[in-house]
């Protein structure tokens, strides 16, 4: 499927000089979202997965669907201050500022195999922080899945050689 035709370019968002790749047109089309879900699932191949981590907020769209298909648990990684129970935090740089992510301390058990999912791999700061959170809880990252990989930003270099799959690469 031509997923690229479902991605909208938004100039100067969230700040001047950024060309934002908007996935909402893909989400609005029943066939596109179904095919995207199927392809993301197929990317996992024969990896055993205990938990699927979805990153706040657009990672929450496909991660629970993947967890369901993989018979795995879903773990939300949220922006600072959004999780109610005891949590672990990780700060990171992103392409237009800094932020902090958090995960519940009991979300991942040592040795669990984890699939990381987010909408975009850009500079890699977010994905790197997510992988550190998973590893700090004793989880094993088996793969990182994305809708879009902005390869010109070389974010994959921050991901310690983890397998990376994406529907689209720019």
Image (cartoon, rainbow, N blue to C red):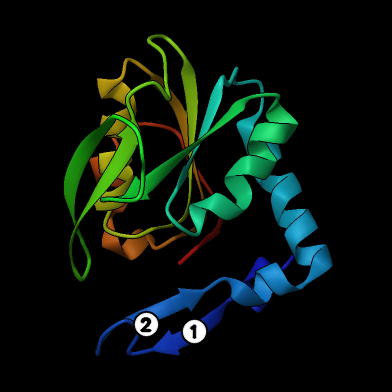
At mark 2, the secondary structure is strand
Outermost residue to the front: 84
Question: Disc 2 marks which residue?
Answer: 19
- Badge 2 crowding class, 10 Å Cα cut-off, few under 14, some 14 to 19, many 20 or more, is some
Residue sitting at 74 percent across and 33 percent down?
69
View extreme (top): residue: 111
Which residue is painted at 57% across and 71% down in the image? 23
Please identify the quarter of the rendering in which residue 20 is found: bottom left
User: Where 127 falls versus 52 (above or below)?
Assistant: below
Q: If you read the primary sequence from the N terminus, does the residue marked by circle 2 or circle 1 appear first?
A: 1
Q: Which residue is mark 1?
A: 9
Name the residue: 36% across, 40% down: 84
Label 1 crowd (10 A; few <14 / some 14-19 / many >=20): few
Residue 79: x %, y % from top left? 31, 52
Locate residue 25: give its quadrant: bottom right
Asked whether the beta carbons under mark 2 and mark 1 sit within 8 Å of each other, the answer is yes
Looking at the rendered structure, which numbered label has been put on residue 54?
Answer: none
Label 2 vs label 1: CA separation?
6 Å
Residue placed most toward the observer, 123 or 169: 123
- Judging depth in this view, the residue of 23 and 72 nearest the camera is 72
Q: Quadrant of the C terminus?
A: bottom left
Residue occupying image coordinates x 33% and y 60%? 122
Outermost residue toward the right?
31
The percent position of residue 1, horizontal first and vertical second, equals 76, 63
Task: Determine whether the residue tagged by mark 1 lies in a helix, strand or loop.
Answer: strand
The spot of residue 124 in percent (x, y) is 28, 51
- Compared to residue 141, the image places residue 78 above or below, namely below
Q: Place residue 154 in its image quadrant.
A: bottom left
Residue 147: x and y, percent? 55, 57
């Amino acid at each position: 499927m031509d997923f690229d035709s479902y991605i909208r370019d938004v100039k100067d968002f969230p700040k001047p000089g950024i060309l934002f790749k908007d996935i909402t047109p893909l989400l609005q089309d029943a066939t596109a979202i179904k095919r995207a879900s199927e392809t993301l699932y197929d990317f996992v191949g024969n990896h055993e997965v205990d938990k699927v981590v979805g990153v706040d907020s657009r990672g929450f769209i496909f991660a629970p669907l993947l967890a369901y298909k993989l018979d795995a648990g879903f773990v939300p990684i949220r922006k600072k201050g959004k999780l109610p129970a005891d949590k672990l935090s990780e700060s990171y740089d992103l392409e237009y500022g800094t932020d902090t992510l958090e995960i519940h301390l009991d979300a991942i058990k040592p040795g669990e195999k984890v699939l990381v999912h987010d909408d975009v791999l850009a500079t890699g700061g977010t994905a790197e922080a997510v992988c550190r959170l998973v590893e700090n809880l004793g989880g094993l990252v088996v793969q990182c899945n994305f809708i879009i990989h902005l390869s010109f930003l070389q974010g994959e270099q921050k991901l310690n050689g983890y397998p990376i799959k994406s529907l689209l690469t720019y």
